[in-house]
Image (tube, rainbow, N blue to C red):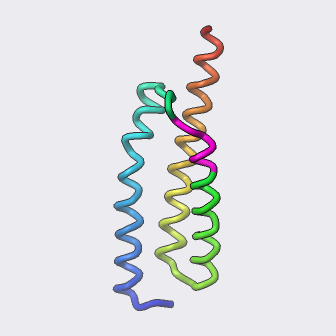
Amino acid sequence: MAAMWIEAIGLLAGVIGIFAWIPQIIEVWVHKRHEGLSLTSFSVVSFALLLWLVYGVLVDSIAMIIANIMTLSVIGAIIVGARRARNSHQMSD
C-alpha cells in the first residue's frame, strides 16, 4: 500500500472529482432535464471507472477504490435520473 500521504492526495482528488458531477445531478434530478445527455457516453465512462476500480483493488490503493466507488455511484444516479426523466417525458407526450 502506498504511503498514507499519497493515498490522502488520491482520496482528495477523488472527492474533488465528485463535485464536477453535482451540476449534472441537479439538472437531471431537480430540473428533470435530460436533453443532450448521452447514456452511451456515461456507460463507457462507467466501464472505464469499473476497470480503474479493479486496478485499485489489484494495487491495493484505498484512494482509488473509494474514489471510483463514489464516482460510479454518482454516475449511476445520473443514469437512473436521466432514464426516469426520459420515461416521464415519454408518458406525458
The rendered magenta stretch, by its main secondary structure, is classed as helix
Eyeballing the image, is 59 above or below 17?
A: below
* Residue sitting at x 60%, y 28%: 84
Most extreme residue toward the top is 93
* Residue sitting at x 52%, y 36%: 37
Residue 56, image x, y percentages: 57, 77
Residue 8 sits in which quadrant? bottom left
Locate residue 80 relative to residue 32 in the image: left or right: right
Q: Compare residues 40 and 61 and report the one nearer the observer.
A: 40
Residue 64, image x, y percentages: 50, 73
* Residue sitting at x 58%, y 70%: 52
- The question of residue 32 being in magenta is answered with no
Residue 49 sits in which quadrant? bottom right
Locate residue 81 relative to residue 7 in the image: left or right: right
Eyeballing the image, is 2 above or below 34?
A: below
Q: What span is colored magenta in the figure?
A: 37-43
Eyeballing the image, is 85 above or below 8?
A: above
Q: Compare residues 1 and 20 and report the one nearer the observer.
A: 20
Quarter of the figure that contains the C terminus? top right
* Residue sitting at x 42%, y 25%: 31
Residue 90, image x, y percentages: 64, 16
Residue 14, image x, y percentages: 41, 66
